[in-house]
Image (tube, rainbow, N blue to C red):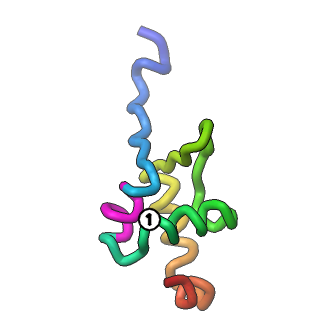
């Protein structure tokens, strides 16, 4: 068994999942996409879709949720 098979696979989310599950519906799908396009949310673009990992979003939240800039994001 190689090293890649031993590691756990990252859990990829799409923008609608991020809006619904990560932000509990408090931030709309359109706002998630806008934040992503502005480079404020960590994501990878493949084709026309953005993909997010739970780990990257949690790390982002820990760094940014207490900042005044976050307070202006609605």
Q: Residue at x 44, y 49 (%)?
A: 14
* Residue 72, position as x, y percentages in the image: 57, 89
Tell how many labels.
1
- As displayed, is residue 52 above or below residue 36? above
Q: Dot 1 corresponds to which residue? A: 29
20 in the magenta segment: yes
Q: Main secondary structure of the magenta part?
A: helix
8 in the magenta segment: no
Q: Quadrant of residue 19?
A: bottom left
Q: Is residue 31 left or right of residue 13?
A: right
- Along the line of sight, the residue nearer the viewer: 37 or 2: 37
Q: Which residues are magenta?
A: 17-23
Q: Residue at x 68, y 66 (%)?
A: 38
Q: For the N terminus, give its image quadrant.
A: top left
* Residue 54, position as x, y percentages in the image: 42, 52
Q: Residue at x 32, y 63 (%)?
A: 20
Q: Residue at x 31, y 61 (%)?
A: 21
Q: Is residue 1 left or right of residue 72?
A: left
- Along the line of sight, the residue nearer the viewer: 68 or 36: 36
- As displayed, is residue 3 above or below residue 64? above
Q: Given the current orientation, which residue lies at the most extreme right position?
A: 38
Q: Secondary structure at mark 1?
A: helix
* Residue 70, position as x, y percentages in the image: 55, 83
């Amino acid at each position: 068994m190689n090293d890649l098979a031993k590691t756990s696979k990252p859990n990829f989310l799409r923008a609608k999942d991020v809006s619904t599950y990560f932000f509990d519906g408090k931030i709309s799908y359109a706002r998630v996409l806008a934040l992503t396009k502005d480079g404020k949310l960590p994501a990878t673009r493949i084709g026309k879709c953005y993909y997010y990992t739970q780990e990257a979003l949690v790390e982002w939240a820990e760094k940014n949720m207490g900042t005044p800039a976050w307070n202006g994001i609605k």
